[in-house]
Image (cartoon, rainbow, N blue to C red):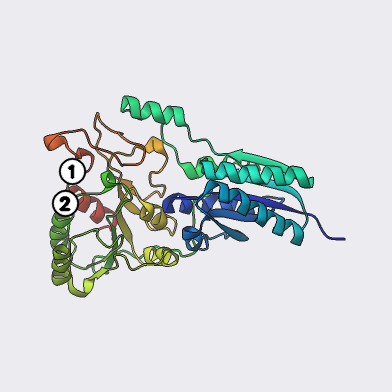
Amino acid sequence: MMTRNSLDIVIRFSSLGDIVLCSAFIEKLARQKDPHQIIFATQSSFRDIVSTFKQAPHKIWALPSSSLSVFFKTWGLLNSEHSQRPLHSLRVYDLHGVPKSFFLKCAAFIFALTHGIDYVSSTTSKKSIRRWLTLLFKKDLMGQRHVYAEHQKLITSSPEILLPQLTHKHSSPHYSQDRVKKILIAPDSQHWKKKWPVTLWEEFFRLAYISIPNAEYTLVGGIDVFPMDFLDQLKESYGQRFQNKLGQLPLVDLPRIAAEHDLTLCGNSAWQHISESVSVPVISLPGPIVKGFGFSPFLEDSRELEVHLNCRPCTRHGGGVCHMKGDNFHACMKRISPELLLKNTKELLRL
């Protein structure tokens, strides 16, 4: 007689940084007293980053982009699982709450109903009303929170909150004045308001060349983050101490690259979450994003340089139009000076 089994499906389709934060949920799920087989459902483009979770899921489902296609693909995958290992229970954890995850849950529910399988579904809270009010009144009404911690509240077996972790891990360095400091620079972001202007990066590098003479820098992000003439200047000034990795890194290599550094300077982007998940502190420039949105740094040594403005937050993710004029245009980023970033960099590197 075949053993009947249990299956957990965790849903998060995007984006890169949000998926990295789900690594804590997978680890907590695996620690349960009655562990089930764990499947992580996501887009095919994020399959490689899921494979770098410290606690990897048993399987990764790479699902199509169409909601209706997700329904039929899920049905087929569940049928395959059931034929290999007859299921007696199915639990679905929706960490995204988008139409595609709704269609996945519909397929799972109907499949469980028609096959006599116990079914439980839970969805993480987006706190949409408070977030909308935060945007309306331009005031953080949500308080300090972390989405990865809120995900874990769906698992009631333990009150312990785990931190996101990827496979690679940075070892705490022995700080000394003459040791080479390795700094990862990740200026890119999916949304323009969370990008520090190139002119300020230029000034930061000019100051850092004098103040941190033994530092090495690695630049990561999209291929067009910095103009070519600026990249040429950096290569000429820093020589072998500067590596340009723009547009060159597959997702599976990102945790390894981050772990090779002592500090990451970035916007509120995927690199912030990747770096912290391999124990590398960050200095984050959040721009229009506030702590109540749940994506602030979580390591004790990390820092977030924010400017308190009456127009902040203005959007949920950092896109859209900046309605401020003149010197106030994009002030949430422009008022973070290169001197302030350099000061915090030196403090974290204990210089």
Direction from residue 108 to residue 117 in the image, left or right? right
Q: Is mark 2 on a helix, strand or loop?
A: helix
Name the residue rendered at 26%, 49% in the picture.
195
Residue 67 image position (x, y, % from top left): 54, 46
Residue 306 percent across, percent down from the top left = 27, 40
Look at 38% across and 47% down and name the residue there: 297
Percent across and percent down for residue 251 are: 42, 63
Q: Which of marks 1 and 2 is nearer the N terminus?
A: 2
Q: Which of 117 and 185 is in front in this view?
A: 117
Circle 1 sits in a helix, a strand or a loop, which is it? helix
Residue type at mark 2 is: Leu
Q: Can residue 152 be seen in this view?
A: no
* Left or right: where 167 falls relative to 341: right
Which quadrant of the figure has residue 121? top right
Marker count (numbered): 2
> What x and y, as percent, mark residue 68?
57, 47
Q: Can residue 294 be seen in this view?
A: yes
Q: Residue 264 carries which label?
A: none
Q: Which amino acid does label 1 sit on?
A: Lys
From this viewpoint, which residue is outermost toward the right?
1
Judge the density around disc 1: few (<14), some (14-19), many (≥20) Cα neighbours within 10 Å: some
Q: Do the residues labelled 1 and 2 touch (CB within 8 Å)?
A: yes
Quadrant where the C terminus sits is bottom left
Q: Distance of mark 1 from mark 2, alpha carbons?
A: 8 Å
Residue annotated with mark 1: 334
Image quadrant holding the N terminus, namely bottom right
Dividing the picture into quadrants, the one containing residue 61 is: bottom right
Residue under circle 2?
A: 200
Task: Say which quarter of the image contains residue 287.
Answer: top left
**Is disc 2 surrounded by few (<14), some (14 to 19) or many (20+) residues within 10 Å?**
some
In the image, is residue 30 above or below residue 136?
Answer: below
Q: Which residue is drawn at 31% across and 63% down?
A: 175
